[in-house]
Amino acid sequence: MFGTLPEFFKNEDELRKIWSNPVTCRTLLEKLESAGYGREELNTLQKLIDAEKSDLFDVLEYVSFAMKPITRETRVAQAQSKIFKDLDSKQKEFLDFALSKYIESGVEELDQEKLPGLLTLKYQAIRDAEEILGGVENIRTTFIDFQKYLYEKAAA
């Protein structure tokens, strides 16, 4: 794995850009799986480097660039003010819920395919979520847009 990762991203900034969008993140995970680095292998690697509470991004960053992994909880704490900056209280409440699921379970919770399940879990019905959060497109945009802040490089 150590020698093959440059085939998937050239540098740390490119990895951040890929990982900060759920569509490109999923594509990268699929490419890694096709190359023999599926969820099981990545989870094993995560355990080997003692990063089970970290994002898979941190595992890839560690393997590729020798960057020390941080926990998902720390990642959220570092980004929370930027994530919530321009949101109303209802959007903040939903993203806080989504982020708690991310901290608990990992990056899979940030996949677009998880969005309907998260909305149903939080609001019991998609229709209720739409009324509270302002429609499907607004919900989708909010869910995708906040992720770029999660993977921004922390100020040195």
Image: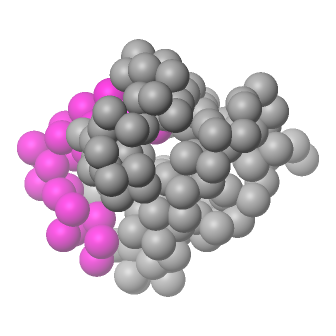
In percent of width and height, residue 69 lies at: 60, 66
**Residue displayed at 30% across by 45% down:** 125
What coloring was used for the rendering? one colour
**Residue displayed at 39% across by 82% down:** 48
| Quadrant in which the N terminus appears | bottom left
Residue 84 appearing in the image? yes
In percent of width and height, residue 129 lies at: 42, 38
- Residue furthest out toward the right: 156
Residue 82 horizontal side relative to residue 148, left or right: right
Along the line of sight, which residue is nearer the eye, 97 or 2? Answer: 97
Residue 88 horizontal side relative to residue 57, left or right: right
**Residue displayed at 89% across by 47% down:** 156
Residue 59 appearing in the image? no
Along the line of sight, which residue is nearer the eye, 153 or 73? Answer: 73
Q: Which of the 4 image quadrants contains residue 46?
A: bottom left
In the rendered image, the vertical position of residue 18 relative to residue 100, given as above or below:
above
In the rendered image, the vertical position of residue 62 relative to residue 6, given as above or below:
below
Which region is colored magenta? 16-44
In percent of width and height, residue 3 lies at: 33, 50
Along the line of sight, which residue is nearer the eye, 9 or 112? Answer: 112
Q: Main secondary structure of the magenta part?
A: helix
Residue 32 horizontal side relative to residue 150, left or right: left
In percent of width and height, residue 61 lies at: 52, 52
